[in-house]
Image: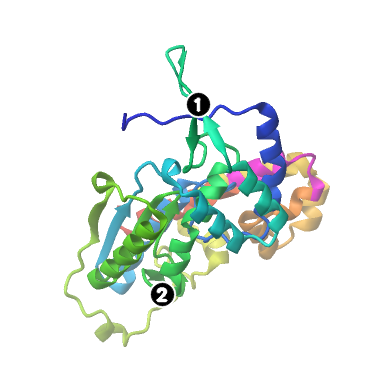
Amino acid sequence: MDNYRGIAVTPVISKLFECTILPRLTVNFNQSPLQFGFTKGLSMLMASLIITEARAEVKLVTMEPLFLITVDSQKAFDVVDHIILLDALYDHTQNHPLWSIVKNLYSGLVSRVKWKGTISDSFNIHQGVRQGGILSPFLYKVYVNNLLEDLKSHNLGLKIGTNYVGYPTCADDIAFLSSSLQELQCMLSVATHHARQSRVTINPTKTKAVILNKPKNINRSKFSGGRESALCKCCGTSDEDITHFLLLCPALHQQRKETFSKLKSYVISVIGLGYWSKEFKGHLDLIRLIIDSSFLLPKLRNRTELDKIQRLATDMCYRLHSQRVWKLQGK
């Protein structure tokens, strides 16, 4: 039975009702920026990008070790405690009437199992969020968000520069990143504490530890005085910032030419060449398009066009990043 998951079949009217309240529930939800699961515009690829970038950072800049531990929950959706979930949701939303609606949706639940044409007797449900439910992914993110906030508030985990990247997460799959074994142990202790509080069991077969970088004993600071040059390590022609990386670095020219041309062509096809020429005159305008194209929504016919623009922009960033890491690793 461990290999089976129950898929909840609910009335269409119930699903439509959940669709109407979901956008309002998410308005004030302070989701962790490192949670990439069940989030529009984000994907597991972005979590893997962080891990790849972290590996490049410690290998080429800090010369520190890098350890990764993956942690996964057993039957994540099925073991969510309703009281704990509603308590967390109450803390994360300021719309208490909507909270009451969710409370009513998860009160007095009754279900039956259909298997090979046979339907079981009715039984009460006291835990779990519905597999296949409209609200379920959001509710599960609320359920685990306190763990992610706790890790960050204690400053546990890796940083790239000043950017905290300690726990790239996809729903219930968490990757702990650190250059310190002691810090990793603290992160695991925090996770274990939250698992007990939330009545979640960590899956031992899916919990793995990996050493991503074994540094050589080189004291880099004696050559640089502890100062790290801002010069781009790919081309060596100018300082590396977001403008240089996305638009100017000659070492990434071919990859940029292929991906940006697709993005530009599609944007022009939906907003027109005249508007493109008027609005996108400089580097900052193009960076804004690549990083956050939501400002174009009033000029588009529907949300689908914006989604495609964002996918093309994300693909461009991913391919440029991959090419950069490939060059830095000397492949």
- Name the image quarter holding residue 176: bottom left
Label 2 crowding class (10 Å Cα cut-off): few <14, some 14-19, many 20+? Answer: few
- Return the residue nearer the eye: 41 or 85: 85
Seen in the image, is 120 located left or right of residue 258?
left
Mark yes or no: residue 288 visible.
Answer: yes
Q: Label 2 amino acid?
A: His
Q: Give me the C-alpha separation between circle 2 and circle 1.
A: 45 Å
Q: Label 1 amino acid?
A: Ser
Residue numbers of the magenta segment: 298-312
| Residue 80: % across, % down | 45, 47
Mark 2 lies on a secondary structure that is loop
Residue found at the very far top of the displayed protein: 117
183 in relation to 47, above or below: below
Q: Which residue is mark 1?
A: 122
| Residue 242: % across, % down | 55, 66
Q: Main secondary structure of the magenta part?
A: helix
- Name the image quarter holding residue 5: top left
Mark yes or no: residue 42 visible.
Answer: no
Residue found at the very far bottom of the displayed protein: 225
